[in-house]
Image: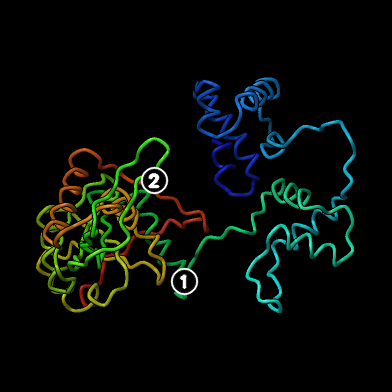
Amino acid sequence: MRLEAHLRCGSCTLAEYRRGRIALLAAEGTPTTAIAKELGVDASTVSRWRGRLARDGLGEDISEALKDEFRSGRPRTISEATRMQVVATACDPLPDAEGLSGWTLDLLVEEFDARGIPHISRSSVHRILQEKDVQPHRQTMWLHSPDQEFVEKVAEIVPLYLAPPPGSIVLSFDEKTGIQAVERKHPDRPPSPGRFARHEFEYIRHGTQSLLATLNVHTGDLIADCGATRKGDDMERHMERVAAHYPDVEVHVVLDNLNIHKGDRWVHFNERHGGRFHFHYTPLHASWVNQIEIFFGVLARRCLRRKSFRSVEELRAHVMAFIARWNGRDKKPFRWTFAGFPAKPVTPVAMDKKAA
């Protein structure tokens, strides 16, 4: 759908994104009050936009259809050039001379006063930045991949996710190491009206466990082993379980570049299994290409967070119980997307038996 594609491209403002979501939810028949609650806006806003969309539709230019209509009223006292200067300054790094780490509204006002720019109050700066969807106080993390074959490796993996070769399956493998068996020194206190749950700060360490997991990216099925170590022998035993679980089919495995993932061990492993395993390595520093990382996020949020474990045995049993529930009730393929560059239709190449 054109509207969904437009919202995913990342070029619209927060206000335009909300208006697009209103249109999508309204098309699904969602009531106005439910839309307002989901998007965190007033019901009158939803009603107004539903009426405008019913009247005018989206037309050919979706971006234009989601913009504000012209409003009469007092002319703006701050020119568009000055507004863009506010945005540009907020997006520039702060000078290091005074030991400050980032812009605040007060610092921006101070900077504009020093430049002699009139009519810029704290509320004006806030309103301009909010209107342009600029949030200099917030940041996210990213990691650059130094892999010279980044494009080629991603272009090899993405088609496997979209349409695996006939008669084959696509698996995603990795290890989650250092899962700590941490026991809180005192029991948690549950929430009550007007009060959050409380978590004891001090803890006792009882050791760690490593989880080896293989995800079928098209069904959500998971094969997992949890133990004290993460060595080549542990991985080989795990992959033997995978081979037994998926007999007589071509198996494409997406995994990262850890040293135990490569070498003669896997040449011999593949020879034992008729050469039906094909290993596809993600680019360096690009774990997001590997879908098993999404499951590890689910595991951390739904299984490990806020829990207290008195031993590694208790931790292991808890993790495996969660995985049993996943396979029995919760499993589903993840909706993995990549918007960096158009994926080329590359035919996956079988792994050379003479090279890892």
Residue denoted by label 1: 145
**Please, is residue 147 above or below residue 36 in the view?**
below
**Please, is residue 323 above or below residue 262 in the view?**
above
Residue denoted by label 2: 335
Residue 20 pos. (x, y %): 60, 35
Q: Verify CB contact (< 8 Å) between mark 2 and mark 1.
A: no
Residue 206 shows in the view: yes
N-terminal label among 2 and 1: 1
Secondary structure found at label 1: loop
Q: In this view, does 58 lie to the left or right of 314?
A: right
Q: Name the foreground residue: 231 vs 137.
A: 137
Picture quadrant where residue 206 is located: bottom left
**Total number of numbered labels?**
2
Residue positioned 29% across, 46% down in the render: 189
Q: Which amino acid does label 1 sit on?
A: Ser
**Please, is residue 6 above or below residue 207 in the view?**
above
Picture quadrant where residue 350 is located: bottom left
Residue positioned 76% across, 48% down in the render: 123
Q: Name the foreground residue: 67 vs 149.
A: 67
**What is the number of the mark on residue 316?**
none
Q: Name the foreground residue: 351 vs 309.
A: 309
Q: Which amino acid does label 2 sit on?
A: Arg
Picture quadrant where residue 197 is located: top left
Quarter the C terminus occupies: bottom left
Residue 130 pos. (x, y %): 69, 47
Residue 169 shows in the view: no
Residue positioned 17% across, 65% down in the render: 275
Secondary structure found at label 2: loop
Residue 309 pos. (x, y %): 19, 57
Q: How is the image coloured?
A: rainbow
Residue 349 pos. (x, y %): 31, 64
Q: Is residue 49 left or right of residue 71?
A: left
